[in-house]
Image (cartoon, rainbow, N blue to C red):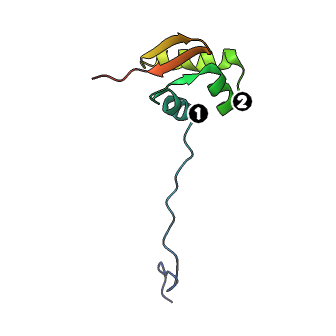
Amino acid sequence: MATGNRTKPNAEPAKTFRAKPTRREQLTKLLNRKSGASIAQIQKAFGWQPHTARAAISTLRKRGSRIERTDTDKGAVYRALTEG
């Protein structure tokens, strides 16, 4: 009796696992846009309250990201500053 790994002749190749982007990655993507993101846009994207959106931005700053805040007629707009 032989033992060993046998594969089915018509077996599909293994699918690669791709995790969904984390909230931090999604927020960073919003802030990296040329136009940046307002608190209202962040609230709508994640379903957060304004204080939660500001706290998430603060957390990114604590992790070393440079975030710029600009006041506009429609409220504050936040942008990630790129080095260069």
Residue furthest left as drawn: 84
Residue 65 bears which disc, if any?
Answer: none
Q: Nearer the viewer, residue 75 or 11?
A: 75
Lower sequence index among marks 1 and 2: 1
Residue farthest to the top?
71
What's the CA distance linking mark 1 and mark 2?
11 Å
Q: What residue appears at the point 56 percent right and 37 percent down from the top-left corner?
A: 22
Q: Which mark is residue 47?
A: 2
**Residue 6 locus on image (x, y percent):** 49, 81
The amino acid marked with disc number 1 is Arg
Q: Secondary structure at mark 2?
A: loop
Please determine whether, in this image, residue 10 is positioned above or below residue 45.
below
Which element is circle 1 on? Answer: helix
Above or below, 70 against 19 in this view is: above
Crowding at mark 2 (Cα within 10 Å: few <14, some 14-19, many 20+): few
- Which of the two residues, 3 or 27, is positioned nearer the viewer here? 27
Camera-side residue of 33 and 66: 33
Instruction: Determine which residue is flagged by label 1.
Output: 23
Number of marks:
2
The image quadrant that residue 64 belongs to is top left
Q: Position of residue 32 (x, y in %)?
A: 45, 29
Q: Residues within 10 Å of mark 1 (few under 14, many from 20)?
A: few
